Amino acid sequence: MSAHIKELTKGIFRENPTFIIMLGMCPTLAVTTQVINALSMGAGVLFVLFFSNVMISLLKNVIPDCVRIPCYVVIIASFVTVVEMIFHAFVPSVYNALGVYLPLIVVNCIILGRAEAFANKNSVLDSALDAIGMGTGFTLALTLIALIREASGNGTVTLLGIGDWNGVINVPIFSKWPVKVMSLAAGALLLMGYLKAFFIWKSSVSVKKEVKP
C-alpha cells in the first residue's frame, strides 16, 4: 500500500513535472495568464495522461519495440481528440482561449515521457497512479502560476462563469495598481525562476531531514 501511495504522491511535490523535472514548459508559460485556462489545461492533460498510461500499460507486451513511439503518439492523439471535442462542445470560450496548445498536448513531454519511462515498464495500477499524481502535480503547478500572474498582473481571478456571474473575482489593491509585467512572458519566466528556487530549497531541506541521524 505504501508503494502505491508513493507512486500517487510523487508527482505532486517530489517529482513535480513543472517545478522539479521541468517538463511541459511551453503550455505552462503560455496558458497561465488566467486561472480558468490553467485549470482547463491541467484537466485536459490529466485526462489524457491517465487514459494513455493505462492503455499503453495494457498494450506494452503487444506493441512492437520498433514502432513503440509512433504507437504512443496515436494512442495519445486519440484521447486528445476526445478532450478537444468535449471542450469545444461544453466550454467553447476555454477551447478558443487555449487555441493551438490544446492539440499540442499530443506532443507534451510529460505525457510522452511517462509513457516511455513508466507505463511501458509497469503494471496498469501503478501506471494509473503515476498518471494521477503527475497530472495533479501539473494542474496544481499551472494553477499556482496562473493565480499569482493573473491576481498580480490583472488584479483579477477568472473562473468559469455560472448563470449571471461572469466568473471574475477582483483582487484588492492589484485591481487598482496591477503589476503589468506579471501578465507578460517576462513575468512568467521571472515567477518560474523564483518558484523553481523555492522547490529546490524545499527538496534539499527534505533530503537533509531524511539523512539526519
Image (tube, grey):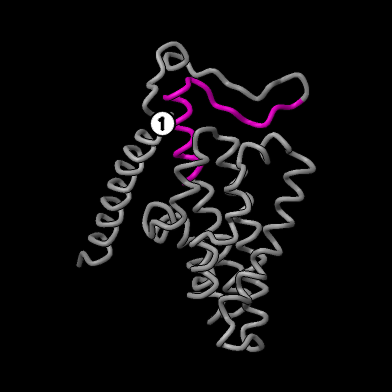
- In the rendered view, does 17 fall on the left or right side of 202? right
> Is 196 included in the stretch rendered in magenta?
no
For disc 1, the neighbor class at 10 Å (few under 14, some 14 to 19, many from 20) is: some
Q: How many marks?
A: 1
Residue that appears at 49% across and 60% down: 9
Residue located 37% across and 21% down the image: 179
Where is the C terminus found, in terms of image quarters?
bottom left
Query: What amino acid is at disc 1?
Result: Leu
Q: Quadrant of residue 34?
A: top right
Q: Residue 86's x, y, as percent?
A: 76, 48
Q: Give the quarter of the image for residue 212.
A: bottom left
Residue under pointer 1 = 184
Which percent across, then down, holds residue 15? 41, 61
Q: Which residue is drawn at 62% across and 36% down?
A: 97
Q: Give the range drawn in magenta.
A: 141-162
Query: Residue 145: within the magenta?
Result: yes
Q: What element does badge 1 sit on?
A: loop
Residue at 42 percent across and 13 percent down: it is: 173
> Which one is nearer the viewer's eye here, 119 or 211?
119
Question: The N terminus appears in which quarter of the rendering?
Answer: bottom right
Asked if residue 85 is positioned above or below residue 177 in the image, the reply reads below
Image position, residue 120 (x, y; %): 55, 79
Q: Which residue lies furthest to the top in this view?
A: 176
- Please state which of residues 212 and 115 is positioned toward the viewer in this rendering: 115
Residue 207 location (% of width, % of height): 27, 62
Vertical arrangement, residue 203 with respect to residue 64, above or below: above
Q: Which residue lies furthest to the left in this view?
A: 213
Q: Could you tell whether 125 is left or right of 85 in the image?
A: left
Q: In which quarter of the image is residue 162?
A: top right
